[in-house]
Image (spheres, grey):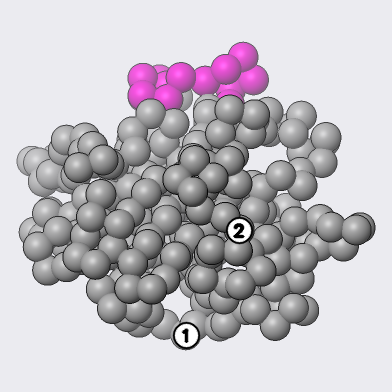
Amino acid sequence: MNIGAYKLFAIEAGTFWLDGGAMFGIIPKVLWEKMNIPDDRNRVQLATRCLLIVGNGRTILVDTGNGAKCTDKFRSIYSYDDTTNNLMGSLQQICISRADITDVILSHLHFDHVGGSTIKENGAFIPAFPNATYYVQRTQWDTALNPTERDRASFIPGDYLPLQHHGVLKMLEGEIELFPGIDILLSNGHTAGLQMVKISDGTKTLFYPADLIPFMSHISLPYIMGFDLRPLVTLEDKRKYFSRAVDENWMILFEHDPSIVLGTVKKTEKGFAFGTSVEMKQ
């Protein structure tokens, strides 16, 4: 897909499984299981879908999935599967090497979004993309360094501390146009300083909301993850960004939906709903 000077690619980086109740919060299983079928352990499948943006002399990766350095215990707990699709393999399919990446925008530092940011080499964790600058919100960085008992398990220091140690991490503070036509937008419901990416040329817009809208089914306003630290903030942010998405005809890339990659939102009498699927290769 082309937007302005940029060519965009959805990068599949593997799948894993999380508890369905946690993914849908207060929504009864009898409702959410219609769209997200659980396994015998009540888990639903999640994709890890990154976004690659190429143009204006930059090769930008948004999020990095779980990565390849996961332990056997991690793979067992989450049924993590990177045999069919993985970050490096998906990049290689479009002839992009680790060294080609100039920038990595991290929506936040939970393990399924930042795990691929580092690799293990000679017993040490190092940045996976040697020529890249990595971007994260300062409030998210502070949260990762001082997590609460509630969200501590979501942060794995080996995924992000090496970025600071190697001097490749850049802190952002608030919403900003990071590059021409590429804006960073914020939400603080799922976690503090969740940064989302909007690419627009004034006519066509793609929105990468990360965990504000993990599945297509989360378009319905009450569908909010149990993982979210401030669910009412998530609710208001969904309302705000969906209103813009409808008015400006945004396309939304779903980072975790195993089936729906890209689509639109429409306004209905009951609130907001999924509009139509959009082909990424257009």
In the displayed structure, would residue 211 be above or below residue 241? above
**What is the residue that sits farthest to the top in this orientation?**
40
Q: Nearer the viewer, mark 2 or mark 1?
A: 2
Name the residue located 66 percent from the left edge and 54 percent from the top edge. Answer: 115
Name the residue located 58 percent from the left edge and 22 percent from the top edge. Answer: 42
Name the residue located 58 percent from the left edge and 72 percent from the top edge. Answer: 132
Residue 167: quarter of image: bottom right
Q: Which residue is mark 2?
A: 98
Q: Are marks 2 and 1 in contact (CB under 8 Å)?
A: no
Q: Where does residue 275 sit, x and y in percent of width and height? A: 16, 38
Location of the C terminus (image quadrant): top left
Q: Amino acid at mark 1?
A: Glu
Q: Is residue 237 left or right of residue 79?
A: left
In the displayed structure, would residue 144 be above or below residue 24? below
Indicate the secondary structure of the residue bearing disc 2.
helix
Q: Dot 1, crowdedness within 10 Å: few (<14), some or many (≥20)?
A: few
- State the residue in front, 94 or 47: 94
Q: Please tell me whether residue 34 belongs to the stretch shown in magenta.
A: yes
Q: Where does residue 87 sit, x and y in percent of width and height? A: 58, 45
Q: Which residues are magenta?
A: 30-43
Q: Which mark is residue 173?
A: 1
Q: Where does residue 242 sit, x and y in percent of width and height? A: 21, 55
On the question of residue 24 being in view, the answer is: yes
Residue 55: quarter of image: bottom left
On the question of residue 160 being in view, the answer is: no
Give how far apart the Cα atoms at labels 2 and 1 are. 27 Å
Q: So how many labels did they put on this image?
A: 2
